Every structure is written in structure tokens, then in C-alpha cells.
Amino acid sequence: RISSPTPKEALALVMSDDADAELAKPLLRHLSLQPVLHDLREPGVRGKLERFVWGEAGSEARFLLCRVAEPLEIPACSRGTGRESDESDSDDASGAEGDST
């Protein structure tokens, strides 16, 4: 039985400059099935993976990039919590009143 490459070996093959879509596609699929992807968060890895996004290995590359992406941090919204400043509402109201006189 032939064993699969380790994640480090698969990543090294994908990262090589001469890696093409035919080689990368099964390796990217193999990498995306790994439970832990710490090595893919190293600097420079994302750029190497992005070169496959628009080619034959595109779906595998996009899936893998999504798996290793950092979660988005969205600032809390104060709208509707009663903590909004009164200035924005009063400016709109006074502007409308000023136009009608």
C-alpha cells in the first residue's frame, strides 16, 4: 500500500516553484482534509496557494485558503442600543426644520 504524504511533505511539493495544477490538485485536496493546518499559516504560504485559485486546482485552493483564513473581527455596532449620540439625529431634524422656514 502506498502511503499519503505527510502534510509537511504535501505543502513542500505545492510550494515548489515548478508545481503545476496536475500535481497540486490532489495535494491541495489532501491538505484540506487535515484536521490541523498550522503550517499553512506561515508567511508566504498564502501567496503560493493563491496562484492556483484561477486554474484547474482553483476549487481546492479556494477551499484550503478559506480553511486557514483568520476569522474576521467585526466591531460591535451601537445602533439601536440607546448609546448613539444625539447629535446626528438633532442635526438631521434641525436641518429639515431650517429648510422649511
Image (cartoon, grey):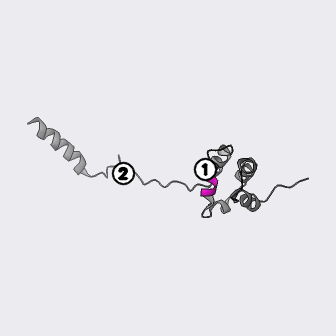
Q: How would you rate the neighbour count of disc 1 (Cα within 10 Å): few for under 14, some for 14-19, many for 20 or more?
A: few
Q: Is residue 63 above or below residue 46?
A: above
Q: Nearer the viewer, residue 98 or 28?
A: 28
- The image shows residue 91 at horizontal and vertical percentages of 19, 46
25 or 91: which is nearer to us? Answer: 25
Q: Which mark is residue 78?
A: 2
Q: Residue at x 76, y 61 (%)?
A: 9
**Disc with the residue nearer the chain's start (1 vs 2):** 1
> Which mark, residue 4?
none
Q: Is residue 41 left or right of residue 91?
A: right
Which residue type does callout 2 highlight?
A: Ser
* Residue type of the residue flagged with mark 1: Cys
Q: Residue furthest bottom?
A: 43
Q: State the residue in front, 65 or 38.
A: 65
Quadrant of the frame with the C terminus: top left
Residue 5 position within the rendered picture, expressed as x and y whole percent measured from the top left? 80, 57
Task: Kindly indicate the quadrant of the structure image that contains residue 13.
Answer: bottom right
Q: Exactly how many numbered labels are in the figure?
A: 2
Above/below status of 95 relative to 2 = above
Judge left or right: residue 39 versus residue 77: right
Residue where numbered disc 1 is placed: 66
- Camera-nearest label, 1 or 2: 1
- What's drawn in magenta, residue-wise? 47-52
Q: Nearer the viewer, residue 57 or 80?
A: 57
Q: Position of residue 85 (x, y in %)?
A: 27, 52
SS type, badge 1: helix
**Crowding near the residue tagged with mark 2, few <14, some 14–19, many ≥20 C-alpha atoms within 10 Å:** few
Q: Position of residue 20 (x, y in %)?
A: 71, 51
